[in-house]
Amino acid sequence: MYSYRIEQAIRAAAILHEGQKRRGKVPLPYVTHLAAVAWIVSDYTDNEDTIVGAWLHDTLEDTDYTREELEEDFGHEVKKIVEAVTEPKEKDGKKLSWADSKEAYNEQLKVGPEEALVISAADKIHNMRSIVEEYHDNQKAFLRDFPGDLDERALRYQNLSNILNRRLTNDIIAEFNHVYSEYKNFLGHVSKISPNQNL
């Protein structure tokens, strides 16, 4: 699907995320992730607001773009969608830990619109698929590039999976579950080479 608003979202995403790189062995321009998420979303819906939201889903989290600017440029519905998939960085004036930020994100999805759930599923599909493909034969590099507790990482994904499987009616959930299964198997292999992990 292509429209003037989607073209404007592509341009906004490219400008707002200019210079940002995707974490991984190859530091690809971040916009490649946004394009992948938008294309995955487009496989499962032709709703324009959802596709626009997919292109812009990280703007509030990773750029200086404000909620007011987002609403002015793309409307209230897109703002509502993007807000639901934006990880909170602080609460009551206090900076949230990585784990608390992920948990707050999951709490938002429990009440967020269906469109946000579709984008969240597509976002995680691309993240998980990229990791499994890039680090399948070099799991030590994954531990280096993505430090942190594997059990904590697995728990956050499981919590998200529970929410998506409970609330999503869109067919994207089948693809999410397939990729998530591969990702869990990957983490299991990684845990075997890391003596401090107990997945």
Image: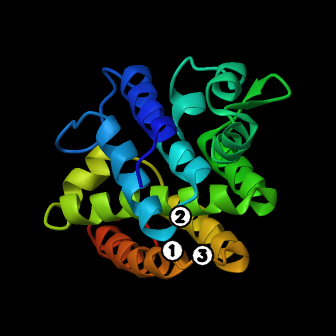
Q: Position of residue 16 (x, y in %)?
A: 44, 22
Could you say whether the residue bearing mark 1 is in a helix, strand or loop? helix
Residues under numbered marks 2 and 1 in contact, where contact means CB atoms less than 8 Å apart: yes
Q: Residue 42: image x %, image y %?
A: 44, 61
Q: Earlier in the sequence, mark 2 or mark 3?
A: 2
- As drawn, 145 above or below 14: below
Q: Give the alpha-carbon distance from disc 3 to disc 1, as whole Å.
A: 5 Å
Task: In this rendered view, identify the residue nearer to me: 112 or 161.
Answer: 112
Left or right placement of residue 38 versus residue 111 in this view: left
Q: Mark 1: which amino acid?
A: Ile
Disc 3 and disc 1 in contact, CB within 8 angstroms: yes
Q: Is residue 155 above or below residue 17?
A: below
Read off the residue under disc 2: 121
Dot 1 alpha-carbon crowd within 10 angstroms: few under 14, some 14 to 19, many 20 or more:
many
> In the visual, does 52 lie left or right of 109?
left
**Earlier residue among tags 2 and 1:** 2
Q: Give the image location of residue 155, x and y in percent.
A: 59, 66
| Residue reaching furthest to the right | 92
78 or 174: nearer the eye?
Answer: 78
Q: Mark 1 sits on what residue?
A: 172
Residue 75 picture quarter: top right
Q: Hey, which quadrant is residue 140 in on the image?
A: bottom left
Report the quarter where the N terminus lies. Answer: bottom left
Assess disc 3: are there few (<14), some (14-19) or many (≥20) residues with their C-alpha within 10 Å of its C-alpha.
some
Answer above or below: position of 133 versus 87. Answer: below
Q: Are marks 2 and 3 in contact (CB under 8 Å)?
A: yes
At x 78% / y 62%, what residue is drawn?
Answer: 110
Q: Amino acid type of disc 2? A: Ala
Q: Residue at x 51, y 59 (%)?
A: 153
Image location of residue 87, percent across then percent down: 64, 41
**Label number found at residue 170:** 3
